[in-house]
Amino acid sequence: MASVLKRRGRIQVRLDERERVALLDIVERLTVHISRALATTPRAYEDETKQAEYDRWVRPEIERGYEADLDVIRDALSAGDELLVLTEAQVYAWLRGFNQLRLAAGSLIGITEDGWESDATDALRAQPEFGMLMALGWLQEELVAALES
């Protein structure tokens, strides 16, 4: 089973082959939906003209940053190692990447605000994206806890 811990100042993520393959599949399946999730993010400006300028000049850089974070995740998972020793910078890339993937999964299953858990139906919990959301959330929590230890 996956585990995350901190040793000698480095974060170690242990994933067996099945877990690495599953996580890579989640990354690939949700990456294409990140732009949809970006459409639900808060606006920078109320003014339409200013927002359009922001989207034109800043949004592409933000999206390149997301893709770079996802590349860090893909590279680590594709290495084929059961024990992944991550630098702090890599851990932060994983956290940012997982956050975007979780937003994509949430948008696919219709989550629009905090507190949705108490209203989650069995049908919602049966959707594959729900499992992806939970797996990514668990890994995020473990990474944050390891950083704080």
Image (spheres, rainbow, N blue to C red):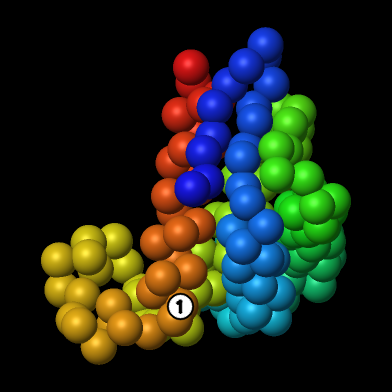
Residue for point 45% across, 29% down: 145
- Counting from the top left corner in percent of width and height, residue 116 is at 24, 68
- Counting from the top left corner in percent of width and height, residue 82 is at 70, 44
Q: Residue furthest bottom?
A: 123
Residue 64 visible in the shown view: yes
Locate residue 53: give its quadrant: bottom right
Determine whether 61 is above or below 121 in the image: above
Residue 130 relative to residue 23: left or right: left
Locate residue 26: give its quadrant: bottom right
Residue 27 visible in the shown view: no
Viewer-nearest residue: 21 or 43:
21
Q: Secondary structure at mark 1?
A: helix
Q: Which residue is mark 1?
A: 129
Viewer-nearest residue: 146 or 102:
146
Determine whether 16 is above or below 101 in the image: above
Residue for point 61% across, 67% down: 22
**Three-letter amino acid code of the residue under disc 1:** Glu
- Counting from the top left corner in percent of width and height, residue 4 is at 54, 35
Q: Residue furthest left?
A: 118
Mark 1 is surrounded, within 10 Å at the Cα level, by few (under 14), some (14 to 19) or many (20 or more) other residues, namely many
Determine whether 138 is above or below 35 in the image: above
Residue for point 82% across, 67% down: 60
Determine whether 146 is above or below 28 in the image: above
Could you tell me how many numbered marks the image carries?
A: 1
Residue 148 relative to residue 53: left or right: left
Locate residue 85: give its quadrant: top right
Residue 90 relative to residue 132: left or right: right
